[in-house]
Amino acid sequence: MSLHKLRLAAAVPLTISTFSSRLFLKPFPNTLTLGLFSRRLQQHKPLLVRAFSASATVQDIPATQTTVSSARPQWKASIDFKWIRDNKEAVEINIKNRNSNANLDVVLELYENMVNLQKEVERLREERNNVAKKMKGKLEPSERERLVEEGKSLKESLVSMEEDLVKLKDELQHVAQSIPNMTHPDVPVGGEDSSAIRKEVGCPREFHFQIKDHLQLGKDLDLIDFDSAAEVSGSKFFYLKNEAVLLEMALLNWTLSQVMKKGYTPLTTPEIVRSSIVEKCGFQPRGDNTQVYSIDGTDQCLIGTAEIPLGGIHMDSILLESALPLKYIAFSHCFRTEAGAAGAATKGLYRVHQFSKAEMFVICRPEDSEFFHHELIQIEEDLFTSLGLHFKTLDMATADLGAPAYRKFDIEAWMPGFGRFGEISSASNCTDYQSRRLGIRYRPSEPLQTGPKKGKANLPATKFVHTLNATACAVPRMMVCLLENNQQEDGSVVIPEPLRPFMGGIELIKPKLK
Amino acid sequence: MKGKLEPSERERLVEEGKSLKESLVSMEEDLVKLKDELQHVAQSIPNMTHPDVPVGGEDSSAIRKEVGCPREFHFQIKDHLQLGKDLDLIDFDSAAEVSGSKFFYLKNEAVLLEMALLNWTLSQVMKKGYTPLTTPEIVRSSIVEKCGFQPRGDNTQVYSIDGTDQCLIGTAEIPLGGIHMDSILLESALPLKYIAFSHCFRTEAGAAGAATKGLYRVHQFSKAEMFVICRPEDSEFFHHELIQIEEDLFTSLGLHFKTLDMATADLGAPAYRKFDIEAWMPGFGRFGEISSASNCTDYQSRRLGIRYRPSEPLQTGPKKGKANLPATKFVHTLNATACAVPRMMVCLLENNQQEDGSVVIPEPLRPFMGGIELIKPKLK
């Protein structure tokens, strides 16, 4: 439905409402709203009632289409619509390459509509101002009366149009937020099999005896208890015991000290956060198959990674350029529902609901993010090499990037008990995807021009920072690797040298006498 | 009705049988309801109380021991919030935006201090024969109830997970109690002594006022908790062992504190006897609780179903079998705080501050912090 008709009918409220109702009738593909920001359905009703209260021509909206525009978004992403419009071919190709559900055509159409409606609103405002001006002068009574009428009519149209504009902007936000980040030109296009190997370190250890997997080692060495945890909490929960506790603490202590040497500031973070923060980082707290646990009776969730509270620290802020880069190493517990994950890829410590993790997070200028992406992956590779792991670093292909990542390097380590490689870390460059949602900007240092005039006009415009995140140590995955790779024929497990000082010097986890 | 009967006799018996059956079914239903009702009201009967426990409210608690004395400061002291800001150690403001009030980020040396406190505490307590554990922090709500807490209802301290029967733990005592639930342990396995490290989550609903400032009352914190499962005749002994461990730990860290024998009105329902330790917090100008050691006797074990079978058979004889096994008994459980990190931080920051704004790290913790002796103000 084109907006030309709207312009002609601007003064007639009836048509505006018809336009509004047409907006909600426009068929959106089901996949657009499902699994994205699936809002609670009970939030839809009040808005729809409000939308139609202005008009007599209330139309029945078929139930399936009421999922379209829901409650007002709690926050807005600063999406660069102009850029998207000017680069729509590239954006479309990117969406396809990533197997994203985003609907660019809808976004562009809504954007056009929004821009035109915005112009229309401005035009009407100007007309109204003119009328007001005219009414200040000397007028014939009939003329005055006519102007009063005109003024009233313009005001009504404006109110109605401004309401529509708000709704359009909300709708635009809603559909545009699902457009994934652009992709680094070197990233391979395709699915899982297309990911490129950047580096391979070590080789699989040759065993001359029957090896055990980490679950068996965990039982035999009295290190891991899944059975009691299943009773107390449910499946995919566990207790660590004895040397495994010391090993977890050694891993985290050692990792923290290594990464701090590279100038990263240590932090611990809240593990309960407002759900809006989760969304702004690019995760979906609600809806089927969400990875996120929600707290009953609040708008709070449990974090699945420290990336979330780290992104939140500087939200809605303007940083000084001289403060950048900000580099953090944060330790937290992480909670994930793992809904939808099943099968062999969930055995033992490989997939659990709760785990300890040390996460690196960088906030920097756009021109520096590529450099820091390489710094982060180098730190990870150094850590895992020091621990004696056999691993490969992958440049993840387009279909395997999450929406926020411009480029993502995953490290997969050899897990002999599984007989395959398993992911132990992930390093993403999110460029400005998260910062546009979290509202993290910086002000460049150099003023654009020097001169006698001081003041806001001389301050350079703020820009969005780039954010990056990378796993320094995901404890359960590391334990799988260390237990399975370092086992010996007598059933003991060798502790990697770098960790020994952090474990009171223990060199070996030995079978316990019974 | 199995014998030989006249038809009329048989018919009479059939009628009698039917009528009895109906009465039984109805009565059995009533019995189930009665039992449920009985459970419901009886569960709220608190544990009995040790004869030496003072009767009365908060003011009646008895001081068992006092260690150290308040440090004399010759300069204007800061509270831990101010120290946290000045030394860039604690961030409440960002956390308020991200999560809400009573949440915080630890930064820089405070992170190292937390890790040092937990590492050192773990190593000290392990020396006393306690087995280290980490625990789930999400548990079924029934476990929370069996330990004597109330997950639902107004002013509950417990966070519940949406769409499940699960809750977040407020203390590792809960998943520790759950490990051996519905079990019969061998007497030779006792005592079981655990030192567990976990994050703890509390709604702190209903807590307000000055007693909530800064790190003193927060929604999420790290804690090392001791838990003992033993024979009934040994629980008093272990209660004293636990309080001794706590007192040794806090003495080593140079704290000034007093150990209180909590009065009857201040015991939680599960506790037969409870020793709290309150340490001097100069920033608050008063003592604040840093640990609690409870002997719950069989209150929790009767709910969690933790029993043990005594070793000695009651009689020896040719007949083997279940008849000769001694009857199982309920174990006693105890729990005690080894280290509640935020409360310890309040104490250490406020007590160890110096005039130049730095904070001295207690000697035992330095090796666990890469040798750092001092938290110094940072150059800006």
Image (cartoon, coloured by chain):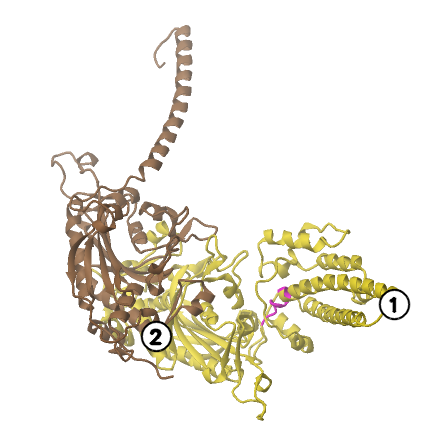
Chain colours: A yellow, B brown
Picture layout, residue A143 above or below residue B39? below
Q: Which residue is mark 1?
A: A140
Picture layout, residue A169 above or below residue B154? below
Magenta stretch contains residue A176: yes
Picture layout, residue A412 above or below residue A446? above
Element marked by disc 1: loop
Three-letter amino acid code of the residue under disc 2: Thr
Say whether marks 1 and 2 touch (CB < 8 Å).
no
Q: Nearer the viewer, residue B110 or B1?
A: B110
The answer to whether A1 appears left or right of B352 in the picture is right
Pointer 1 local density, CA inside 10 Å: few below 14, some 14–19, many at least 20:
few
Q: Quadrant of residue A82?
A: bottom right
Q: Which residue is mark 2?
A: A255
Say whether disc 1 or disc 2 marks the residue closer to the N-terminus.
1
Q: Which residues are magenta?
A: A174-180
Identify the subunit bearing mark 2.
A
